[in-house]
Image (cartoon, rainbow, N blue to C red):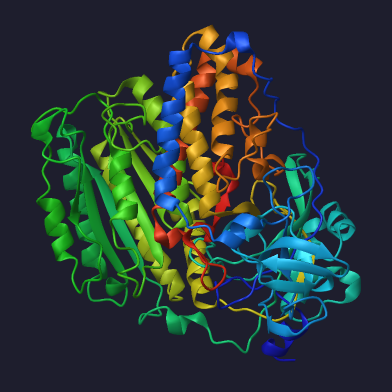
Amino acid sequence: MTKAAMKHSIPSLSMPFRAMRGQSPAAGPVRRRMPGPGAIPAPDPAANPAPKTRARHATLALLGALMLLAVLALPVPLAAQQLRPLLIEGTSSVYQRVLTRPGAALFDAPDSRQLRRYPAFQPLYVFGRRAGWVQVGPSVFAAPEGWVEAASVVDWKQNIIASFTNPSNRRRSLIFDTESNLRTFMEHESLQEIQAQLIDKADNGLLSPRDGVVSIEPETFVNIRDELYLMPILDFVEDLHPLTYEDNLLMKVASLPLDDALPAASAQSGTNNEFDAGVVFVFDTTQSMQPYIERTQKALSKIIYDISGTDIAPLINFGAVAFRDNTQAAPGLDYRTKVVVPLQRRDSQLPVLQAIADTHVARVNSPGFNEDSLAGVEDAIDQIDWDQQGGDRFDGRYIILVTDAGPKDPRDPNARSRIGPAELQREAEDRGIVIMTLHLKTPGGGDANHDYAADRYRQLSRFGQRQFYYPIEGGSEQSFEQTVTLLVTALTDHVRAARGEATVLSPDQAGEDLVDLGRAMRLAYLGTRQGTRAPDVIEGWVTERAAENPSALAIEPRLLVTKNEMATMAELLDNLVRLAEATRSEQDATSFFSQVQEVVAQMAQNPQNLVSADASTLGGALEYLERLPYRSQLLSMDQQRWQESAMLRRSIIDGMRQKLTLYRKWLFDNDVWTALYDGAPDGEKVFAMPFDVLP
């Protein structure tokens, strides 16, 4: 049997869902086994603040609401004002939704003329139900389009979808026909042996019904941020992994199998079909850094000289960003951040070497020991042209941060951004960019600062569940140069391995993390060029954490949010931060929750805000978050816990502020949002939002 024939007989999940061009999958009942968040007590008149305080909070809340709604204000047609989708039973702000099955037809009325057919698994709102029929439309703010047969759609009670993680550090996920068969597989004493046999069978078209496997994860990886695909989670059970007893989700998902008849995506991926890499150095250029800049230039010069004239040379290119600190606090610094040399494809890397050689450190002291390294990394993510103006994007994407200081805390008045290292890491990884940090632990920093910096840079320097933080003890110049050489050589080896060539470093020399990173980048590169779709539906059960390796996340649940929903989250967080910042005394902490209810009630008056005015819990204000398999300090906070710990309050406030900064960034980034249907208004474009950045 040919490979093509095998793939048709043994389905494998397809990855990219291309909005308005492709397909999207199905859904059904959702099982939940989780405690509800802490209750918000009813307002106590005796605990309410003075009228002037209430007026000030109300004014701040109103200003915040007006600012966000001005950005996303949408004209609401008269028909939409008169008819809204049906609510899910027991909620006051969560609308019923369905997903279309393949071939679902839209009718003018039940048993009437057919208007057209929907693409597979189009998300639709439910406006009415009649025996055997469902009235549907794609928008909350528009009249329904018509009717579909109830058998041609499936209920989607929660807008949660599954996304595969990069399988570089685990075996590919097997999708089982039943929850029972998945459990039997995971609990088998010969798990790894059976797993290898089933994967081999799936790849060779030899699976039989008694194997219980309906599909297998694709060999390549597609970043859901680059290519939105819908793999709805129809059902889930919270459980313990049988190997380690760690928390784990078993999920029923739906997706689409591969279709070999479709063209490979490489034809749409630019002119260069060879894996190549872009490396951007982010340098601390404050006073103490001159010897390390020179050592970087020396190490890079040797590597560039070694590959000069080879086929590898044009496939690895460099750029550089410099950072210092707040120039308003110390004008002599000249700049906070600066692109020293842009990342672009070059015949020669001499301009990069010259730009680094010409980089000099500041002549004045910056405010405090910590520097604004997060501003430098943020600019390397946002201002560097990783996609080469939408043409032939860089496949491997690497940022190497070099500093001897910790990052400015987002609360520091001299910090440019209010985004934290964890949120910045998530933004980078979603764009396929890995951040590596070389932290020079020089004597001037002291143990306290080194510990602080190490904690923050470990949060920043993660990718694919692996750590890329490299401490340089004592700030040793020789050790630093050796580490730079190792890293850049390993990155050039990523290109060699993609070409099938021998690597310079052995796996032992490079280390497991760097070898795995190269494989992850190659899988993402192949996935980008091999995106496909198919006409048939696959439903099955899969484990969140890898069956053979519970430390590896195999499936990441995400919430499919609309722009309006994210704006509501941002508005609520904005108001909560304002209120929480005023919580200084125990009496203020007591009144906080009653003030929150006032803010929620104000927001609920705007029909575009999906907020429950009758919420009995803080999480209940955003009802579509309350029933997710997700735990949040904020959403589970009750009045007693809020009052008893000022440190806990500060931690929650800082987390809210950093997430709010990220939401605002996404709201203004058009590349984040995808329209699921022709003519979708701006507020109903969607984004697959990771759980770890929810409120």
Report x, y in % for residue 242: 81, 45
Query: Could you tell me if residue 270 is visible in this image?
Result: yes
Report x, y in % for residue 177: 84, 66
Q: Nearer the viewer, residue 233 or 350?
A: 233
Q: Nearer the viewer, residue 654 or 477?
A: 654
Task: Please tell me which residue is depicted at 66% across the width and 71% down the height of the picture.
Answer: 145
In the figure, 189 relative to 360: above or below? below
Task: Please tell me which residue is depicted at 79% across the width and 74% down the height of the picture.
Answer: 152
Going by the image, does 576 lie left or right of 286? Answer: right
Quadrant for the C terminus, please. Answer: top right
In the figure, 498 relative to 508: above or below? below
Report x, y in % for residue 656: 49, 33
Going by the image, does 552 lie left or right of 376? Answer: right
Report x, y in % for residue 160: 67, 54
Going by the image, does 427 lie left or right of 137? Answer: left
Task: Please tell me which residue is depicted at 63% across the width and 36% down the height of the picture.
Answer: 621
Going by the image, does 348 lie left or right of 58? Answer: left
Quadrant for the N terminus, please. Answer: bottom right
Q: Nearer the viewer, residue 457 or 33?
A: 33
Total labels: the figure holds 0
Query: Could you tell me if residue 554 is visible in this image?
Result: no
